[in-house]
Image (spheres, rainbow, N blue to C red):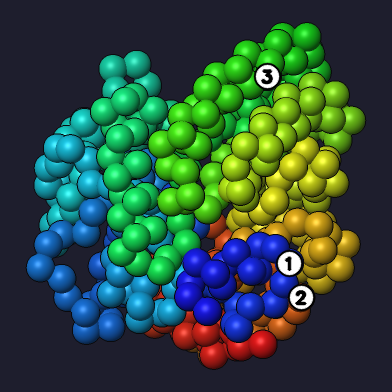
Amino acid sequence: MISRERVLTALNHKEPDRMPMDLGMHTSTGISVFAYDALRKYLGMPQKNPTRVRDCVQLTAYVEEDILERFHIDCIALAPVPPKTKIWRPREGYEYIITDKFNAVLNEKGEWLASDGERKMRMPAGGYFFDGDWITFENRWSDETFSTFVKEAERIYKDTEYFTALTGLSALFGSDIEYFCRMYTDPDEIKKDCEEGLEHELKIVEKIIDGCGEHIQMVAMGGDLGTQNAPFVSPEVFGELVAPSLRKLCGFIHANSDYKIFLHSCGAVEPLIDILIDCGIDVLNPVQITANGMEPEKLKSKYGERICFWGGGINTQGVLGIKGADEVRENVRGLVKTWKPGGGYVFNQVHNILGDVPPENIAAAYDEAYKCSGY
């Protein structure tokens, strides 16, 4: 199979020739630019140009095709080069290509402070990502910017065999504590917000379908629903306030395209999975296996025939960055054995690979996953 066929087969809950693999298709399924550069150096694969920053908050890398080929990756990011870029040097020895709209200054404490005029975020001295407000520095739905995504989607479809998805849709709910508190204190306002958000997202979806057509295979939306211990909101409240609008959004996508629908939602979301399936979500990511109720065996047995899992292939919280390479391989082997049967799974680590993860552990994880990938 070519990569595109392999991923689609798995997403249709069938076994392809081997388990498909991803590294960096979504902005939260990737690798820190710091870890990426260290990995390239470890592999003896230097590059002529600096690494391109794909996400200005998480500081994830655009993963280039030579690395995708090295690790047998089946997915590629739909991430055109911004119209104007500049070089950013976060500290000595590191330089990256970043959009020229990225506005950050270094203060006397060695902290990087970034702003778009209204929102602010901060990276401490020696840090690997920004925290604070989430600033995207682009409006990808503007006609000018969106046209670059349309052209890149066509290039990927015609010139490569990779699977790709357009990211950036909203799942119609917020991801902060204040929002979830408002679901209990102001439920009518939340329901109204969801209905208004639905109208906005439907216009964007129409634009995507008209512009990208068959050149993409999936659309991705995001919104965190869980903490490490439990969902932010009860299934009953989520089902009453958010699910009706989310169901209409997913229904429109499925009725008017062949796209799969990918939801990135961190944390202990197991009590909400039935509702997400009912709404029309096809793929759940990042599958935070160390959160309460997110045991792989339980998820695969209970939901594996009704939703696809994308992630959960290596324990990033307790193994990848702090154990040795042999323990990384062992962790991957056990998880792949659980997730792989019957299809419905794409290998990926839980969320992003952080900046200080040893490169030998990254290589060990992905090489072991490929070694175990055959059906």
Near-viewer residue (111 or 87): 87
The quadrant of the image that shows the C terminus is bottom right
Residue, disc 3: 194
Disc 3 residue type?
Answer: Cys
Alpha carbon separation for disc pair 2 and 1: 6 Å
Q: Dot 2, how many residues are within 10 Å of its Cα: few (below 14), some (14-19), or many (20+)?
A: some
Mark 2 or 3: the one toward you: 2
- SS for tag 2? loop
Q: CA distance from mark 1 to mark 3?
A: 31 Å
Q: Of the two numbered discs 1 and 3 on the same chain, state the one appearing first in sequence.
A: 1
Residue 361's place in the image compared with 284, above or below, is below
The amino acid marked with disc number 2 is Gly
Q: Which residue is mark 2?
A: 342
Could you tell whether 302 is left or right of 54 in the image? right
Query: Marks 2 and 1: CB-CB under 8 Å?
Result: yes
Left or right: 335 as drawn, with respect to 230: left
Q: What numbered label is drawn on residue 13? A: 1
